[in-house]
Image (spheres, helix red, strand yellow):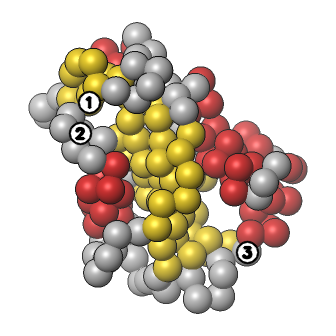
Amino acid sequence: MKDEFFDVVNERDEVIGKRSRQEVHEQRLLHRAVHVLVFNSRGELFLQKRSMMKDCFPGAWDSSASGHLDAGESYDACAVRELREELGLELSSLPMRLFKIDGCPETGYEFVWIYRCESDGPFKLHPEEIEGGGWFAPAAITRWMVERPGEFAEALLLIWRRLQGL
């Protein structure tokens, strides 16, 4: 299996080098990622349950689709690619950019653009990435996060607080 390579960035999200996934994570280097929130026509959010094979937060609930930017890839291109790879979702236009979070421990030292799009599915989940998923009302997600925060990937908890204006 070939190693993935990511752009390493400085505190201003400017590319300063390129390193392997393993090096980036072991050395906690700043790098880039996207999270895409997919809402259906009823206003529910699709959450994925991460595969137990994942190196970070195995089995945790997470954004609809998320992933690292490959070296040289743009945030927008990565968002489209992750939707296609993880959910089998092909968009006719770019998802909407919501906000950006600077690299910090909660994001795994990733600068993250958060996107939103709408789809009612059905999805074709990538089995190596996603164990399962489901649609949840925003109020139910908020209650769930308060009651059992350990069931979620840390980045999603941060994203949800920002999205809710908390």
Q: Is residue 163 visible?
A: yes
Q: Alpha-carbon distance for marks 2 and 3?
A: 32 Å
Position in image of residue 150 (x %, y %): 73, 40
Residue on which disc 2 sits: 70
SS at circle 1: strand
Q: Quadrant of the N terminus?
A: top left
Contact flag, marks 1 and 2 (Cβ < 8 Å): yes
Position in image of residue 34 (x %, y %): 43, 48
Q: What residue do we see at 26% from left, 30% from top?
A: 6
Q: Alpha-carbon distance for marks 1 and 2?
A: 5 Å
Check the image and name the residue furthest to the left.
2
Q: What residue do we see at 42% from left, 83% from top?
A: 122
Q: Alpha-carbon distance for marks 1 and 3?
A: 34 Å
Q: What residue do we see at 46% from left, 32% from top?
A: 110
**What's the mark number on residue 137?**
3
Q: Residues within 10 Å of mark 3 (few under 14, many from 20)?
A: few
Q: Is residue 153 above or below residue 13?
A: below
Say how many tags the image has: 3
SS at circle 2: loop
- Tell me the amino acid under the disc marked 3: Ala
The answer to which of 148 and 32 lies nearer the viewer is 32
Q: Earlier in the sequence, mark 1 or mark 3?
A: 1
Contact flag, marks 1 and 3 (Cβ < 8 Å): no
Q: Earlier in the sequence, mark 1 or mark 2?
A: 1
- Tell me the amino acid under the disc marked 2: Asp
Q: Is residue 20 above or below residue 68?
A: above
> Does 144 sit left or right of 49 as displayed?
right
Residue on which disc 1 sits: 6
Q: Is residue 25 above or below residue 157?
A: above
SS at circle 3: loop
Q: What residue do we see at 78% from left, 54% from top?
A: 165
- Tell me the amino acid under the disc marked 1: Phe
